[in-house]
Image: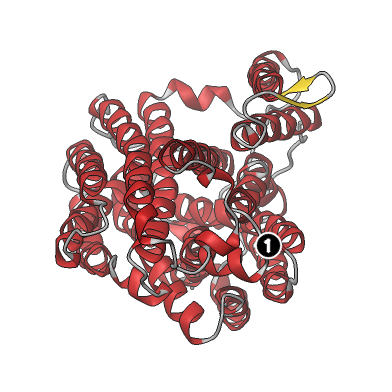
Amino acid sequence: MNQQQDIRPWPALWSLVLGFFMILIDTTIVSVANPAILGDLDADINAVIWVTSAYLLAYAVPLLITGRLGDRFGPKNMFLIGLVVFTLSSAWCGLSGSIEMLITARAVQGLGAALMTPQTMAVITRIFPPDRRGAAMGLWGATAGVATLVGPVLGGVLVDGFGWEWIFFINVPIGILTFVLVLRNVPKLPTHSHRFDLVGVVLSVVGMFLLVFGIQEGETYDWGVIAGPISVWALIIAGLVVLAGFVVWQAVGRGEPLLPLRLFRDRNFSLANAAITTVGFAITSMSLPLVFYYQTVRGMTPTQSALMLVPMAVLGIVLAPIVGRIIDRTNPRNLAVAGLLLLAVALAWYSFLLTPDTPIWLLLLPSAVLGFANAGIWSPISNTATRNLPRESAGAGSGVFNTTRQVGAVLGSAGIAVLMESRLAAELPGGGSAGASEFGGGTLHEALQGGFATAMGQSLLLPAAVALVGAVLVVFFTKPKANVAWAAPARPAAAEEAAPRA
């Protein structure tokens, strides 16, 4: 007990955040390396995009159950297991010699990330009382935002300096350091048993796979027949039906649900989950058209293309801690609405600027707007979602929140792949199926650059529209109230350890 009373919440959080930062970087770091991977492994655009989609899909689907696993076996234990899986599979990614092997390794890497992510939010919810949770969630949200910015920059430097393999090898020393810090600083929190909903797991996995595979492969099969009686639209419809069945099962099943629908009785939790889905969609999908434009049309190196995001990164890092302090004293809704509107404006601005001869300095302006946008999005939405979570629902709630964010990212990756290929096919006949020789090294013929740039600009209107939907959702947030069920003691960590679990 005395050892538990000496727990320091902030060192524990910082240790977890380092691992969280690493796995989030891997969501975006690959985007800047896509042209290099495409050329080196002799793949096409759709196959290379699957390198990201496989990671996101394996990341998103298990999150509902991995949050529960943290409640059952302890968030610290599950985080460490996931970290080992993630670190070893990162080395496997770097050693891959074919696009198929890389996609497989990325899927395993995503599974490791799924084991880690919910544990971070669960620890925050359990060791920080609501009136001090804003700063902690500010750090968590800032980590998510900054990672989306740093990933492409770091990826560019590594690809240019050492090769695309090093965007994965870099995770190995970071993973080892994180393991040591988590082992030392993160407390062992009380656990309670769960009866896992195996039917729900199967329904959610099958439904998500059918939906995402159907969306992303639609253009490949010209939205027609894949094999025999199976068509693209049959897969998409089947996926939606299975997911609807999953929701129904969660409502009527006798056992403990995988997706606790009761959490959605809280208006802010429901809206925050819907909003973070749009954020995941927009942030994930926006990087692909930009990177291909910079490298294929403007002939930039990976590092140069990544440096175009420096204004976004700098402003995001500077503003994130300020926002974290503000949201404990004001309604997070105002910042979130402003952030999502700015995100839509920046992406629409990019859409109009993507031409072969736009001055490079002008492309830095929407990047700066994105910095303001990211600072206003992550912390306010995540804090609103978790503000009223009771301790016994920490794992389930964080699992749901991270799942919806990753579902948005998966759909964003799949959706932007479809749109990019269709617009390339429209602007450049045969462009949607072009291979490495044409789009892999920034050597696109001058006569084709205008059409390619137009296709990338048009593609950015999709995440811009989704960001606007998110802004509308956030408008309906209510001001968070103090959670009376979370009787914050003088020593929250110690009291949490002593509290009995249902």
- Mark 1, secondary structure of its residue: helix
At a point 65% along the width and 52% down the height, the residue shown is 47
> How was the colour assigned to the protein in this rendering?
secondary structure
Q: Residue at x 30, y 72 (%)?
A: 307
Of all residues shown, which one is farthest toward the front?
Answer: 447
Q: Which of 61 and 387 lies nearest the eye of the viewer?
A: 61
Q: Is residue 333 above or below residue 302?
A: above
Q: Nearer the viewer, residue 354 or 383?
A: 354
Q: Position of residue 362 (x, y in %)?
A: 14, 61
**Is residue 63 visible to the viewer in this orientation of the structure?**
yes
Position of the N terminus, as image quadrant, is bottom right
Give the residue pinned by disc 1: 82
Find residue 187 and report its horizontal and vertical position in percent.
57, 66
The x, y position of residue 283, in whole percent, is 39, 48
Category of crowding for the residue at label 1, using alpha-carbon neighbours closer than 10 angstroms: few (below 14), some (14–19), many (at least 20): many
Q: Is residue 63 above or below residue 27?
A: above
Query: Can you say which quadrant of the picture contains the C terminus?
Result: top right
Q: Residue at x 70, y 57 (%)?
A: 103
Q: Amino acid at mark 1?
A: Gly
Q: Position of residue 328 (x, y in %)?
A: 23, 49
Residue nearest the observer in this picture, 174 or 194: 174
Toward the right, the furthest residue is 228
